[in-house]
Amino acid sequence: MINQLSWKIGGQQGEGVESTDRIFSTALNRLGYYLYGYRHFSSRIKGGHTNNKIRISIDPIRSISDDLDILVAFDQESIDLNAHELRPGGVVVADTKFTPTVPEDCDIRLFSVPITAIAEELGTSLMKNMVASGASWALLGLPLDVFNRAVEEEFGRKGPAVVEKNVEAVKRGADYVLELAGGPLDDFKLLPADGKQKLFMIGNDAIGLGAVAAGCRLMSAYPITPASEIMEYLIKQLPKFGGTVVQTEDEIAAVTMAIGSNYAGVRTMTASAGPGLSLMMEGIGLAGMTETPVVIVDTQRGGPSTGLPTKQEQSDINAMIHGTHGEIPKIILAPSSIEECFYDTIEAFNLSEKYQVPVILVTDLQLSLGKQSCEPLDFNRIVIDRGSLVQEAPEREDKALFPRYAFTENGVSPRVLPGQKNGIHHVTGVEHDETGRPSESAENRKKMMDKRLGKLDSLVVRDPILAQALYETPDVLIIGMGSTGGTIDQARELLENDGLTTNHLTIRLLHPFPADEVRPYVEKARHVIVVENNATAQLAGLLKLHVGHAEKISSVLKYDGNPFLPSIIYNECKHICTLSKELV
Amino acid sequence: MATFKDFRNNVKPNWCPGCGDFSIQAAIQRAAANCGLTPEELAVISGIGCSGRISGYIHAYGLHGIHGRALPIAQGVKLANRDLTVIASGGDGDGFAIGMGHTIHAIRRNINMTYVVMDNQIYGLTKGQTSPRSAEGFVTKSTPKGSIESTLSPLELALSAGATFVAQSFSSDIKQLTALIEEGIKHEGFSIINVFSPCVTFNKVNTYEWFKENIVNLDTFPEYDPSNRIHAMTKLMETGGLLTGLIYQDKNRRSYENQISGFRETPLAEQDLALSEEQFDQLLAEFK
Ligand SMILES: Cc1ncc(C[n+]2csc(CCOP(=O)(O)OP(=O)(O)O)c2C)c(N)n1
Ligand code: SF4
């Protein structure tokens, strides 16, 4: 019996890879397994190789694995492109139709199943995904009734006849392969899971859910990969709460509309990726200057320009921090797990209103789109803090304006909303005085700049970093952000096997950089290795700027569009440690 | 009842003496009072330009944003609080050059608000460059040999984008202008009112006298039917766009807010945000 396994399905885009993956993982989730999914797709809708990989485990997991146990292939290309991942003794389930072959020198078992033929016999080749998934499910020896229930849910809307046909397709696939293999494969038998059904979602779902829980009632956004699912989720949910989503004409409208409605008192967000973020910059500056709360999600993908729109990257760090002209206060939160996507979204809205600043919540493609098991989300942790909203403003004489930008001890001024009695004030992106009126006075200018920028001096963020620091003085401190944490931890296990001691920091607050929290860990480590998905070591740059110790900071970078695998991080870290030993 | 004086503040506009924008400001103040609004119930959202300063010269809630983006900000304000009367305002450069994309889509979206364009056919604040509204051959700092681009006809464009309220006026005709803004406010949906507002400093061609000579005023055509879109288009073309009055109104189309499914009468800004545990559990169910 094994405690984890990796399954992959590959084919042409539009061939049913997505739906097979969905049903397969829903059924596994029902059995209580922890799952971690990875979608490899291109920016075409039909055609082009695509594959989905799921890692299945009885324990919590936060990364994909290096290797693969089962590959379900709809075409030879899927075998050619993915067979190298298969572990010795791994299995390929492929369609007889294309006379599949596997590389000769590898220890791979091939089960050729007439997938298309069976599907066509049952009425339509569309059902070949059901035949294929039934076959691979059966090889694992998992209970078929659970799988059938997932099929029923997927096709229930289309009526009992369709459900029945698909269930039959599953059965025929299963029967055929079991006959070939002589029963379920012994070395693929998963230990039973705890049977407790987990939440199973993508990061974008968790962000959408967090937004609803945080009281976000409007979203203005323009579609873009890999952010659109947030919009799609809110289009579905917000009407139930009286809210709505506006698909704007561009991201400039998206962010400025969000600023308008936040100004008028409604928690509003927008979400985009690099190209949209670039368009939003002037608007974000307006929010900073007018002290208007707004939450912006940046789901990073491969840049620059259109770059690799469906691939993994973490290269917007500098753009987020420095993209706006002039100097404004802003907060950049970087959740590193599906659960954090949920809680941090709520936190983003709270911080944004509490400090009256724009907050960017940043993910990366793998965190946004990888479907994962999620620990239970705690209703009692949902807190809505609207900051210094004034309920009733005192009466004013002679049309005196409300001092919306009053100088206060921590720089945060009382806020009133349009429509409110006695609250009239002016708001402008021009430098202004305490009532919002334009002012060019040098003295006022300096005070206002200090007030705005100083607001973040008192910033308190829950867990600006996460530290897994077992060792007082480790050989290696690995630092990362976003979706790479789980992979880093797997690499650490390999390094520890080699006798290297490692600590791990996850940076969750990118700006303002939590230098004081990070510094002690850096100081005590022999090597510091920053792992990030970009070419110019942006996170390492922040570290060197704010913490120093450039002499012991190295980088492991990946910017080919694919997420890290544990082996890559392991090998490069190993290499760095050996090199420096030679130098000594 | 508030009077127009209640919408005045003590800020002295930094417009040049004689600038057309003064009368537009006065007309907005009068129209707001005539509609029975209090200053708190009005939000004026403006762009950047000489004209954009208007939100600071009216005693009401006001936001002076960034160049070309008054409309998306204003739409956000209205969606957040549908009880507010929202007026967006800015120059022809603001609305028809940098902000043109938003103008077209705000028209299509048809949110219940009023857009007053202060059209001086030139860029005032940046000291006299050509605008999409400049006539062909118009000599400016940026077109020393005369503009070689065709002149934009914003209201023809508005009609073809599905506008439900299209009007034009002249800042000297404060009576007509006030009445049109009032009607625009009362109209269910997006109303666009383009106002000829002479820039006395940089535009020596399109002057008060020039407009007086060239404008065709629909108020002098009692038989004109503003519900006919084809006539509206024809009339605009016949007059080279120099037509004032209520040019077109569609009273049947419902505003955006009134078509959003689940959108309530109570402003969103006043609604309770907290979820019940039961609601939260229902949201989680989808992911099991
Ligand atoms: C993004 C951006 N680009 C350029 C400017 C400079 N700018 C300010 S106002 C303006 C044009 C003003 O013309 P118009 O909108 O017609 O208003 P007017 O001053 O004539 O009332 C320009 C180009 C700016 N503020 N922002
Ligand atoms: S420059 Fe022209 S538009 Fe600007 S204030 Fe002076 S007259 Fe008015």
Image (cartoon, coloured by chain):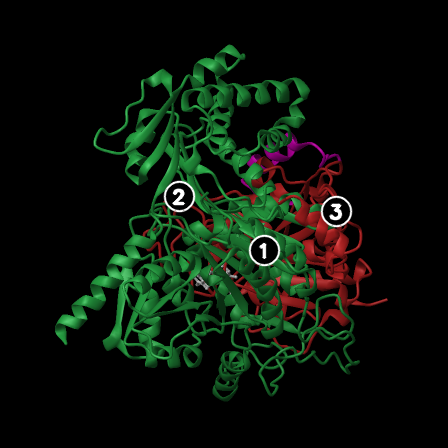
Task: Name the side, left or right, on which A146 lies relative to A44.
Answer: right
Same chain shared by disc 2 and disc 1: yes
Residue found 39% across the figure and 25% down from its top = A74
Q: CA distance from mark 2 to mark 3?
A: 45 Å
In the rendered image, the residue lying farthest to the left is A583
Tag 3: residue type? His
Q: Say if mark 1 contacts mark 3, CB within 8 Å.
A: no
| Residue identifier under label 1 | A375
Is A313 located above or below residue A474 in the figure?
above
Residue found 22% across the figure and 66% down from its top = A576
Ligand 1 neighbours mark 1 (CB distance < 8 Å): no
In magenta, the rendered stretch is B223-245
Residue A321: mark in rendering: none
Circle 1 Cα neighbour tier, 10 Å, few/some/many (<14 / 14–19 / ≥20): some
Residue A310: mark in rendering: 2
Q: Secondary structure at mark 2?
A: loop
Q: CA distance from mark 1 to mark 3?
A: 51 Å
Tag 1: residue type? Glu
Same chain shared by disc 1 and disc 3: no
Residue found 63% across the figure and 72% down from its top = A426
Q: Position of residue A169 (x, y in %)?
A: 54, 20
Same chain shared by disc 2 and disc 3: no
